Image: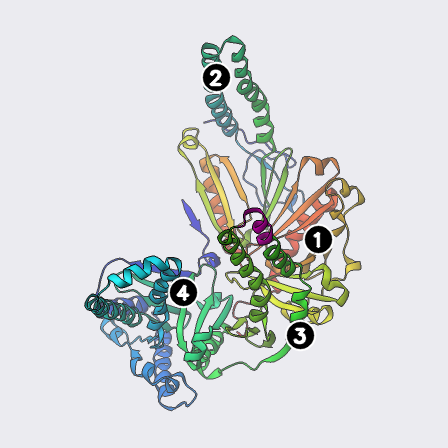
Amino acid sequence: MDTVCRTYAGGMETGTVEDGAERAQGEPVWTGLPRGLLRMRRLLLVVWLGPIAIGTGVLLGWLAGPGWAAFALLPLGLLLWGWPMLGRNWRSWRYAERADDLLISRGVLWREETVVPYGRMQLVEVTSGPVERHFGLASVQLHTAAAATDARIPGLDPEEAERLRDRLTQLGEARSAGL
Amino acid sequence: MTVPIPGADDAMSTTRNTTPEPRTAAEQGTAAEQGTAAEQGTAAEQRTAAEHQAAAEDRGAADPRSAAEDLPAAAAEQRVDLDGEISGGPVAVVEQRLHPVTPLRRAWAPVAVVIGWAVHDPDGAQRQLTRLDPSTLLIGLAVLVPAAALYGFLTWWFTHFAVTESELRIRTGLLFRRTAHIRLERIQAVDLTRPLLARIAGVAKLRLDVVGTDKKDELAYLGEGTARALRAELLARAAGFAPDTAQDVGEAPERQLLKVPPGVLAVSLVLTGATWGTLLAAVVVPSVLWIATESLWTVLATALPLLGAAGASSVGRFVGEYDWTVGESPDGLRIDHGLLDRTHETVPPGRVQTVRIVEPLLWRRRGWVRVELDVAGSSNSVLIPVAPREVAESVIARVLPGAHVPDTAALARPPARARWCVPLWWKGYGLAVTDTVFAARQGLLRRQLALVPHAKVQSVRLAQGPWERFKHVADVHVDTGANKTVTARLRDATEAAALLHAQAERSRTGRREALPDRWMA
């Protein structure tokens, strides 16, 4: 499958971050999510809202009169609004592996940025549901001793997810610390 | 596809296994010993285990303050497993049983059920009683009492515990076997509780708080002497004393830091809003209902729970927090309290995740504060129910070594434009970062200052909603291992972004200077 790894400040092509001077200078090398995730989410949006719009329009037009069929515009509007919103949201997701911690940044209106030091990771989980698998995607979730730590990176390439998992596990082991 | 990180397994400190098949005790013993032999393969460990066993026998015979001396019956039951020899090496773990009074701890339950039923439905109970003829009653009792006694005896007989070099093992169950291995270096706190009836019987409950333990992992009941000796031994082992000396270390000397006088406690409860709130509700709601419905039953049904809540929040708290003593020992912080049920907690050094100083409105004139603390895996949260601020701060300085509580002037307030995000209450927020703690204050009437040592920070998050972004402010959340989050709200957005990274850095470096898990090693 084709994956586009977009890069931000660092200008590096791959998601793999080499040991280098740019990290020492403090500016993290951000990696975006593959395009497959956006495609999957948009498809899900259409699959859900399309039939709902058609169903409402047909049913109401047939049972209550043509005027009522205008209610079908509601899910349709939601669909048209959701399409660019998903794009914006997808663009906002990015992560960076730094020397000692992992950064995850996400959200457009409700922005959230999480910093998890490698030494605090208790568990790294790679999950992939049936739909995600069909699109060749996998999610990585980090758990620390605090349940509030919500460090999840959705929709990665399976190879990238496994590379990340192995690297995080390795780093976590090297910097492991108790509670 | 789940990978636990080796060495960083605090969240899974207790290992359990449950075998759902009936096996004889002998078989189980052998299996357990084989497991032990496999784990403790080295000759050195075998030697220490043997020494440990010898020491235990020696102690049982000679030491006058030993547990065995206090409890002749328990000593008689003390079993030394030597099955290990069959599986290759002379590894022995001294397994002990709980106090023989244990089976009685649930004896009141059927009686309570019968009484509850009689109270709930007096007419029905009366009818059933008249229908019952003495012979049926006798036969019923003749079946039920031995059955209950047998059940109690069997649960007691099949519950064993043992202290090994690095673990406390609790083995229970006749049909469904369950073995809990609690790792001593992961101890977050040790609780010794003596409920009223247990105090009369001279027994106590011992519980190790480790992340992931549940109610079943407590030792209830042990003789009081045994419980104290065991607590001292467990703490000595967890602290890193050699296994053969751990038993002789004894109770660590304790230095009292604070004692709350009953008068102050009573006044503080009188000055608490919650006490008056529940009392007021208990008076007003039934009166209104009486005027509205004039039905005695409705009034009683609402008044009784409300009165109960009012009693629990005033008298209940007084009884629970009576004679509150905070002490300090090399084993950690000691908290003893209670009038009827006595509780003795020990929090080893370096286990406190968060300290909160709560200042209710009515206490402010007297300069009193309440101090709460969070320890991972422990449900107890109060450090000091009430104390003058200076005293509380000196205790906090002992609890979080090197930390001092930033005073009100040192707290940075949110920028004035934050009033558009949280009207009025924005003034209550404040933040101070010292070289040891992250301190965030919230609340206007009931002020609350939360302190997190940098070494205890698990992750840092920055969050910003659309309105906050418009006003150029953001929130910084700091997550700790006790599943609590401390938030510095409404900081200037640029400052918050810098704070996020600086805090992650401080948490990483703070970690290096933190105490080791085995604090005496």
Residue A56: mark: 2
Q: Amino acid at mark 1?
A: Gly
Q: Amino acid at mark 4?
A: Asp
Task: Please state if B364 lies on the left or on the right of B299 as rendered.
Answer: right
Question: How far apart, in angstroms, are the residues tagged by discs 1 and 3?
Answer: 28 Å
Q: Amino acid at mark 2?
A: Thr
Residue B443: mark: 1
| Discs 1, 4: same chain | yes
Name the residue beneath numbered marker 3. B263
Give the magenta-colored segment's residue range: B285-294
Please say whether residue B244 is visible from this viewpoint. Answer: no
Name the image quarter holding residue B452: bottom right
Q: Secondary structure at mark 3?
A: helix
Numbered disc in front, either 1 or 3: 3
Question: How far apart, in angstroms, are the residues tagged by discs 1 and 2?
Answer: 49 Å
Task: Please state if B246 lies on the left or on the right of B149 as rendered.
Answer: right
Q: Amino acid at mark 3?
A: Gly
Q: Answer with mark 1 or mark 4, whichever residue precedes in sequence.
A: 4
Numbered disc in front, either 3 or 4: 3
| Discs 3, 4: same chain | yes
Question: How far apart, in angstroms, are the residues tagged by discs 1 and 4?
Answer: 38 Å
**Nearer to me, A73 or B92:** A73
Magenta highlight: main SS: helix
Question: How far apart, in angstroms, are the residues tagged by discs 2 and 4?
Answer: 56 Å
Task: Please state if B22 lies on the left or on the right of A3 as rendered.
Answer: left
Question: How far apart, in angstroms, are the residues tagged by discs 3 and 2?
Answer: 70 Å
Residue drawn at 50 percent across, 49 percent down: A143
Chain for disc number 3: B
Q: Looking at the picture, does residue A74 appear above or below residue B217?
A: above
Name the residue beneath numbered marker 4. B217
Chain for disc number 1: B
Image x and y of residue B332, in percent:
57, 73
